[in-house]
Each structure stands twice: as C-alpha cells, then as structure tokens.
Amino acid sequence: MAAPGLRLGAERLFEMPAVLERLSRSNSTSQAFAEVLRLPKQQLRKLLYPLQEVERFLAPDRRQDLHLRIFDPSPEDIARADKVFTATEGNRIDYVSSAVRIDHAPDLSRPEVCFIGRSNVGKSSLIKALFSLAPEVEVRVSKKPGHTKKMNFFKVGKHFTVVDMPGYGYRAPEDFVDMVETYLKERRNLKRTFLLVDSVVGIQKTDNIAIEMCEEFALPYVIVLTKIDKSSKGHLLKQVLQIQKFVNTKTQGCFPQLFPVSAVTFSGIHMLRCFIASVTGNLD
C-alpha cells in the first residue's frame, strides 16, 4: 500500500513543469536535489524512478505486474526525504557502534531498518550512497567479498537507525545464522528489512537464507535490486519480471514493489531514501 503522506504521484511528475520549477526555487530543497531536477526528462526519470524506466520496454498488459504505483512519491516527498538524509548541525548522521551479538547491540529506541544480502552484493556501497549527503560518515567498502563481519549501526539524526548486516554465503562469519537470526527475531524496533539481490545474477540459493528468516518471523521486507548499471536493459527487464513473479507467488511478507538501484549512477537512491523515510514515520 502507498505510504502515508505521499501526494502528487510520479506519473504526473513530467506533466507538471510548474512543480519542478517551484521545487527548484524552494529554500527547503537542497542544492543537490535542485540540480537533479534540472536534468533532462529521460535522465530524471531514470534517476528517480528506474522501475518506471523499465516499464517502457513492456507490453501494456504486462505493466501491472510490476506494481509501479504501490509506492509513488512526489518530487516534494523525495525532497523531504533527502533532507532527512542530509547531515546538518541539528541532524547529525553518525556511525554508532558494531556488534557481533544482539546483546552487544546499542540500545536505541528510534525506528530501525537493516540491510542484508549475500557477500559482494553491494550492501556497504549502497549504504554509502544513501549517506552521500553526509560525506563525513565513514562506511567501509571493500573490493573483497565478506568484508562486513559485524552488525554496524548508523544513526540518522533523531529519526532512525540504519544497520549494515554481515553478508551471507562466501566468507560469511561462522556465527552468521545465530547473529542475524537472533537480531531479526528479537529486535523490537526493526521496521523494515531490505534484502539486497544482485540484478546481474538474480535470486540465488543462498538468498533463501534471508528470505526464509523473514518469512518465518513474519517480518516485513523489501527486495532491492543492486548493480543495475551492470545489466543491459533487456537483462534487467528479464530479472525484474522473474523476481517480481517470485515475490508475487512465493512470498507473504515481501513488499510487492521492487527497488532497482545503482550505487554508481545513483539511480533509484532517491526513491529508496524516500521509502526508508516513509516506513520509519518521517514523511507523515
């Protein structure tokens, strides 16, 4: 279902130049986002709404399968979410601590979201991209898979906490299942789990570890397709349709809409920020 507080859906974005002009002049819109709004129409759509960019290559009767309008934020909503992710004196965004066990995790009352996925899926790179408006935050990104061995906690002002979980599969920590399963099962302020899937290779057998955990514990989760800059349009479309079919037929707790992203081109990053702000109650 659409998140509360979302208005003026994306389908009207390109029909209303006045909206873009107003946002570009708004004092409440960051300079970075104002620059985004000046992009040509096609580039703007690809950056803000990559799933709708995929829609262009589908026959009309297949477009409903993509659930494009479930989460349909306006440019105003996206601008508001970007402000939540912008570090200021009154909105500090910091690394908090790391933990290998849930009883070592920081006791934080604010809403929490976590990112989980197999080794080398691009979790740390994605989180670094989400925090690009807070460049002083150190998110370690390694070229070697399996770099993240602990749960890393980052606070976003007084709004919410982001947790970077260890990767599963290749070079996963020996106690991965105990660590992550306990966190997912017992973390009471966890609002949404973001399951990252490599758009180049699709859902792998090892991804069933996280999927089964989320389904077993009845956790609301979202599938994020990473590295879309490395997929051709045809290959990305194929993966989107296959994974969407899997979500529709094989899951109960997964949000029906996929979130394609690239930590390199930043395509989909604004949309993902907006969704996180929404599910943590920061767009009300």
Image (cartoon, rainbow, N blue to C red):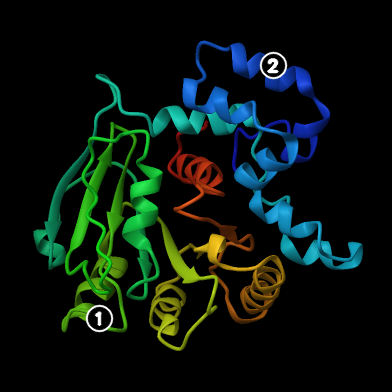
Q: Badge 1 is on which residue?
A: 177
Examine the rendered structure and indicate whether residue 155 appears above or below residue 62.
above
* Labels 1 and 2 touching (C-beta < 8 A): no
Residue at (60% x, 11% y) in the render: 25
Drawn side of residue 31 relative to residue 111, left or right: right
Q: Is residue 227 left or right of residue 14?
A: left
Which residue reaches farthest right?
A: 60
Please provide percent x and percent y for residue 281: 46, 38
> Which residue is label 2 attached to?
21
Counting from the top left corner in percent of width and height, residue 162 is at 31, 49
Label 2 crowding class (10 Å Cα cut-off): few <14, some 14-19, many 20+? few
Type of the residue with mark 2? Glu
Residue situated in front as seen by the camera: 169 or 175: 169
Disc 1 marks a residue whose amino acid type is Val
Q: Is label 1 in a helix, a strand or a loop?
A: helix
Label 1 to label 2: alpha-carbon separation: 50 Å
Q: Residue at x 29, y 73 (%)?
A: 167
> Could you classify mark 1 by the number of other residues whose Cα lies within 10 Å: few (under 14), some (14-19), or many (20 or more)?
some
Q: Does 28 sit left or right of 13 as displayed?
A: left
- In the displayed structure, 179 sits above or below 262; it is below
Q: Earlier in the sequence, mark 1 or mark 2?
A: 2
Q: Is residue 203 left or right of residue 114?
A: right
Q: Position of residue 99 (x, y in %)?
A: 12, 61
